[in-house]
Image: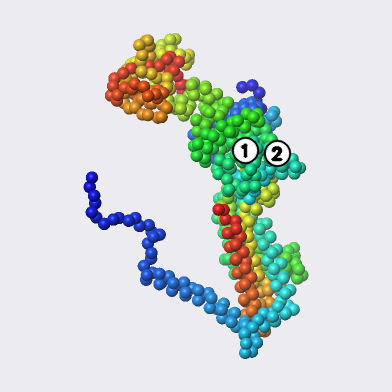
Amino acid sequence: MSGGFLSLEGVRKEFGGFVAVDRFNLEVAQGEFVSFLGPSGCGKTTTLRIVAGFEQPTSGAIRLAGKDVTSTKPNERNIGMVFQSYALFPNMTVGRNVGFGLKVRRTPKDEIEARVHEMLDLIQMRHLEKRYPYQLSGGQQQRVALARALAIHPQVLLLDEPLSALDAKIRVQLRAEIRAIQRKLGITAIYVTHDQEEALSISDRIVVMYEGRIEQVGSPFEIYNFPTTAFVASFVGTLNTTAAEVVDQATHLLQIDGVQLQAAEGLDDRQKGDKVTIAIRPERLNFVSQERKANILDCTVENITFLGSVVRVQVSVGSNRFYMDTFNNPFLELPKIGDKDQVTCSREAVLVLRQ
Amino acid sequence: MTISTGPPITAKTPAAEAPPKGNRLWAWLIFLMGALYFMLPLAATFYWSLRAEKGRFGFEAYRRLFADANFMPAFSESIVNAIAAIFLSLLIIVPTAYWVRLRMPRLRPVVEFITLLPFVIPAVVLVFGIIRLYSRPPLLLTATYDSSRVLLVCVYAALSFPYMFRSVDNGLRAIDVRALTEAAQSLGANWITILREVIFPNLRVATLSGALLTFAIVLGELTIALYMAQKTLGPYMANLTRSKVYEPSAMAIVAFAITWVAMGMIAYISRERKQP
C-alpha cells in the first residue's frame, strides 16, 4: 500500500497478562476505507480504541499524517468516532449534538450553524434539527452520530460496529449511506465489524483479525477468493475445508481419501507426503459435466437446502462432507438425496491454506 | 374433524384476576393504619397550631412566628447554609461518583461505605470530633461565628453524602457514561467541559433529588448547629419549644410544608423529564 496516512507500527496491548493485540502493523492510505473484521474478542475494537486514544498501547506507535500521536490525548487527536450505542448527548438537540465538537473548539456561532446545517443536509435530517435523541429511531440516531463525528473535519473517522444495534434492512441501507458519505468527503475511515457481509460490501481493504493478530489484509475480493489461512477461510463466507496429502509438489497434485485433486498453486514450499489443509468455496464446486476430465470426486448427495437465490447441496466425498452452491432457477435439475454422483472444480478453486 | 363438547377455555392473565375480598380488606386496613400513623400527629400539630387565640381557630401562631425578629434571620441563614452545602456536596460527589464509575468501578463499595459514614456516626459524636479537630491550630476554624459557619456548611455537605451519592450513582447508572465521555473526548472536549456540558446536565433529576433531600435535612438540623453555636432554624425551633406554646407547632407545620414542597418539586421535575 502506498503512503501511510495512518500507520500502526508493531502495536501490542496487554490487559494484565492477557494479550489483546499483538504485532499489529498496518498502513492506511488517505481516503481509504479499511475494515477490521473478526470474531468477538479478537482485538479489533481494542485496536480501534488505541487509534482513538482511549487505550494506550503497551508497545508500538501510532502515526497520523506523519506525526507520532501515540501519547496524544484523545481530545487532541482530531479523530471522529461513531459508537455502537450512538452515544448522542441526551440533553442536547440534534443540532447541538452535531455542533458540540465545533463549540468545544470555540468556532464562531455562525460558522457552527452553517456547518451543522451542512452536515444535517448530508444525512438528510435538516428537518429534525430541533429533536432530541430519544425522539429519533436507531437509524436516525446513528446518522446524527455520524454527522457529529464528521462536523469537526476529522483526519480519520473511526466506526465501532455502528450498525450492530439496528435491524437488518436499516443496516444495509445505512452502510451504503456511510460508504457514499465517506467517498464524497474523501475521509480516511476505519470500520470495526464482526459481520463479514458488511465488511465485504463496504471496504477498500479488510483486515481479518484473530486472537489479537492480523490474519490477512486484502481487498474484499482477495479475502473472499484467496484466503491464506484456515481461519480466514473459515470465517469469511462458507468454505469446504479438508486435510490433504501432497502427492507431487511440481504439478500441485494432492490426495484426499485416495482421490487425486490438483491445485493451481500454494505447494511451492511443500514436499511429497506433507499434510496440508485445502479449501474449496461451495460455489466453485459443480456436478461433473461431459468435458471435465480432472479433479473429479465421487460423491453421495446427503441433503439439499433452499436458501432463496441459492440452492445448497450437501455431498459426502469419502469421509468428507462438502457443500456445493448453485444459483436457484425454476428449471434447475437437482439430484435426489442418496443419489451417487460426481463433483468437480477447477484447479484454481483448490486453495492450499497456510498453516 | 372432531368438535369438542367440553366447556370453553378462556385464558386468564394474572392481572385479570382480582384479589380475594378478604385480602382487599386487609390491604385497606393496613393502608388506613399507616395513614393514621403518619397523619394523626401532623393533624394534631396543625390543630394545636390553630388554637393560639382563645375560643377560636386562626393563624395567630403563624403570624406571631413570622413576626418574631429572630425567625427570618434563622430561616434565611439555614436556607443559605443548605444551598451552600448542596453546591459543595455536588462539587465533591458528582466528579467522585463519575470517576469511580468510569475508571475505578472496583472502588465503588469503598466509596459507598465512606459516604454512609454520616449515617453510622451519631451527630453528637460527629460534632464533638469536629470541634476537637478544628478548635486548635493549624486547623482553627471555630474562632469566629463566620468561620464556624463555613465549617458547619462543610459538615452539612458531609451529612448529605449518603443521599447525594446514591442519587448521583443511580443517575449515572441510567446513562452510558463511558460512551458519552468518549464521544465528547473524541470531539475535543476536556474533563471540565465533559462534566459541565455532558455529565451534570444529564444528572439533573438525580442531583436535584439529592439536593432537595439535603435541603430538607439541613433546614431542620439541630444537634450540630446547636453545639457549634449557630443561629439557624434548628436551634431556633428548640428555643421556641422551651418558651412558647403554639408557635412550635406552627413552626413544625411550616417545616413540613417546605419539605413537602421540596418533595413535590422532585416528583414534578422527574415526571417532566420522563421520555415519552
Q: Is residue A54 visible?
A: no
Task: Decide: is B2 above or below A80.
Answer: below
Q: Give the image's coloring scheme.
A: rainbow
Residue at screen point 52% across, 28% down: A200
Q: Position of residue A46 (x, y in %)?
A: 57, 37
Badge 1 amino acid: Gln
Q: Is residue A17 left or right of residue B142?
A: left
Q: Which mark is residue A115?
A: 2
Badge 2 amino acid: Arg
Q: Mark 2 or 1, which is nearer the eye?
A: 1
Residue at screen point 64% across, 27% down: A31
Residue under mark 1: which chain is it in?
A
Q: Is residue B140 visible?
A: yes
Label 2: element kind? helix
In the picture of the structure, the residue carrying the numbered disc 1 is A124
Label 1: element kind? loop
Task: Decide: is A132 above or below A174.
Answer: below
Q: Where's the N terminus of chain B, which quadrant?
A: top left
Q: Position of residue B123 (x, y in %)?
A: 62, 70
